[in-house]
Image: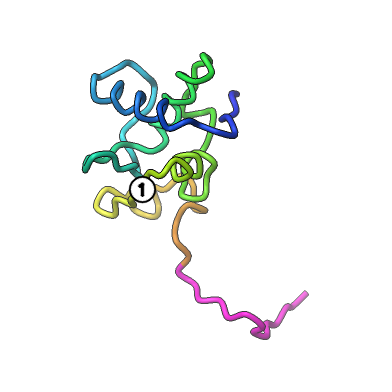
């Protein structure tokens, strides 16, 4: 399993976007939930990060190599280079179909300092 680099230069991200537009062959799918915006168009964030990492390192990255959720390193690397990430709620899978529940926004309200009862 390949590990994403700690830094992903903007030029590789932009080159990855151009390769996506050109139909370059890769193993990534369209976004399930999160997309990167570039010049008014949206692209699958995980795919763009993976293609950019492949360009930078020369090592082939696949979807199995890293996660692409909103709190992932993948998204962090894109945001660090000034890209905006959008959640596509229209394309979001039903909760039962989501593979990574930690990517879903919490529906619970947490109050700091609230008392809770723990039964053992």
Tell which of 98 and 55 is nearer to you.
55
Membership of 112 in magenta stretch: yes
Tell which of 78 and 46 is nearer to you.
78
Tell which of 77 and 112 is nearer to you.
77
- Which stretch did the figure color magenta? 107-120
The residue positioned 44% from the left and 61% from the top of the image is 105
How many numbered marks appear? 1
Tell me if residue 19 comes above or below residue 110 in the rendering.
Answer: above
Secondary structure of the magenta portion, mostly? loop
The residue positioned 33% from the left and 39% from the top of the image is 31
Q: Which residue is mark 1?
A: 84
Residue 90 place in picture, x, y as percent = 24, 52
Residue 84 place in picture, x, y as percent = 36, 48
Q: Quadrant of the C terminus?
A: bottom right
Q: Quadrant of the N terminus?
A: top right
The residue positioned 21% from the left and 43% from the top of the image is 40
């Amino acid at each position: 399993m390949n590990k994403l680099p700690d830094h992903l230069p903007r030029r590789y991200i932009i080159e990855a976007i151009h390769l996506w537009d050109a139909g370059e062959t890769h193993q990534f799918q369209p976004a399930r939930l999160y997309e990167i915006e570039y010049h008014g168009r949206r692209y699958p964030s995980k795919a763009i990060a993976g293609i950019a990492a492949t360009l930078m390192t020369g090592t082939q990255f696949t979807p199995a190599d890293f996660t692409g959720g909103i709190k992932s390193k993948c998204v962090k690397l894109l945001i660090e280079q000034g890209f905006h990430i959008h959640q596509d709620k229209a394309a979001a899978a039903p909760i039962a179909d989501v593979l990574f529940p930690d990517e879903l926004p919490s529906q619970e309200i947490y109050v700091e300092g609230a008392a809770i009862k723990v039964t053992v």
